[in-house]
Image (spheres, grey):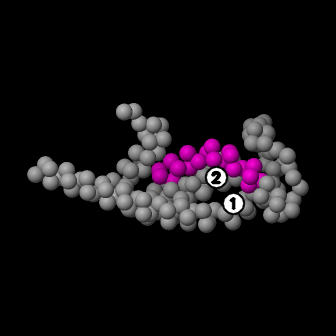
Amino acid sequence: MKESFFTRRLVRPLLELLRQGVTPEKLALSLALGVVLGVFPALGWTTALCALAALVLRLNIPATQLVNYFMYPVQLATIIPFFRLGEILFRAEHLPLSVKQIYAMVHADLWGAIKFLWTSNWHAMVVWGLLAPPIAAAIYYALIPLLKRIVRREKAAVGAAQLGAA
């Protein structure tokens, strides 16, 4: 049976990291940070943020970047909600924009887009900064038991294979 793209490109590499000795706690933190940093509401910054966080916290850079890569569609889907929440939080004027318009602005004139979107983007980043820590903590604490269970199953499978070979 052929594996799905998701299984082949995300699940298998993460399982390999566990097999190579990455602890469930370190992997859970790498994944949680990859998720929350991957939706940072400023296009073009997530790769650097994930790398920096992984280096500073001595986490698994490939795991963090892998999840960041998979979060790109979610980042695009959440950028406008972050803008809207920023407008509410700061009682700012509504800026009627779509992701498609933002993307076109960035590609047409990066500096002009930065200047035009600066206030909305700053507000969105503040909202993200308020939401990211509890979401990261929830993901982290939800993943630890799952990853520990996977490690136990892997160890049991290796033990059973060794007994069968003896």
x, y (%) of residue 154?
Answer: 30, 54
The residue at the point 85 percent across, 46 percent down is 96
Element type at mark 2 = loop
Q: Quadrant of the N terminus?
A: top left
x, y (%) of residue 49?
Answer: 60, 56
In the rendered image, which residue does mark 1 sit on? 128
**In 3D space, how far apart are the residues under numbered discs 2 and 1 (Cα atoms)?**
8 Å
> How many numbered discs?
2
Query: Disc 2 vs disc 1: Cβ atoms closer than 8 Å?
Result: yes
Q: Residue furthest left?
A: 166
Could you tell which of marks 2 and 1 lies nearer the N-terminus? Answer: 2
Q: Is residue 139 above or below residue 98?
A: below
Regarding residue 54, the answer to whether it shows in the image is no
Q: Which residues are magenta?
A: 62-83
Query: Residue flagged by tag 2: what amino acid is it?
Result: Val
Query: Residue flagged by tag 1: what amino acid is it?
Result: Trp
